[in-house]
Image: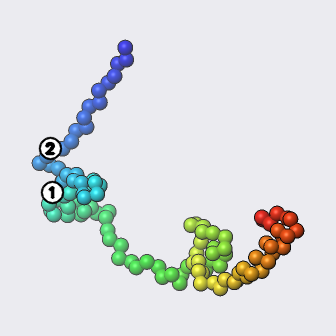
Amino acid sequence: MVDTVRMKRPPFPPEDDASGRVVYDDRGNAVWQWKDEDTLNQKLAHPRLELDEDPPPPAGSLAANPLAAKTGYNPYGSGVIDKDRPRKPKDLRALSEWIALKKKRGEDFKR
């Protein structure tokens, strides 16, 4: 026979002392609904909490990375990716002629 220990329910504050309750929005996500504005302001009036009013750094301060568009994205050192670089046009007619020549010779034209 196996002995199991029943877990005790954690001590929750009485309903009168609670700062709010969990409600579910229309998509089924759990959201905390505050009891009133005073409770919300009391919880947010922590001495270590502060709002940062500094604007984000301008994009010009980042170094340009010309290789990122060719080699791939590196989240640790990518810099600014130049997406407007000129691309070399592809000559599809020459490609078709090359494939036809390989088929005519009987060679495998897959790379």
Q: How many labels does the image show?
A: 2
Q: Can residue 63 be seen in this view?
A: no
Residue 6: x and y in percent read 29, 26
* Circle 1 residue: 35
* Residue at numbered disc 2: 14
SS at circle 2: loop
Q: Residue at coordinates 53% horizontally, 84% vertically from top-left?
A: 60
Looking at the rendered image, the disc whose residue lies closer to the viewer, 1 or 2, is 1
Work out whether 86 lies above or below 42.
Answer: below
Residue 57 visible in the picture? yes
Quarter of the picture holding the N terminus:
top left
- Mark 2 neighbour density, 10 Å: few (under 14) some (14–19) many (20 or more): few
Cα–Cα gap, marks 1 and 2: 13 Å
Q: Name which quarter of the figure residue 68 lies in.
A: bottom right
Q: In this view, does 11 lie to the left or right of 79?
A: left
Look at 79% across and 77% down and name the residue there: 97
Display colour scheme: rainbow
Q: Residue 64 carries which label?
A: none
User: Hey, what amino acid is under mark 2?
Assistant: Pro
* Residue 93 image position (x, y, % from top left): 74, 81
**First reached walking from the N terminus: tag 1 or tag 2:** 2
Residue 7 in picture, x, y percent from top left: 29, 30
Residue at (72, 79) in percent of width and height = 92
Q: Is residue 16 left or right of residue 30?
A: left
**Residue 66 left/right relative to 34:** right
Q: Which residue lies furthest to the top in this view?
A: 1
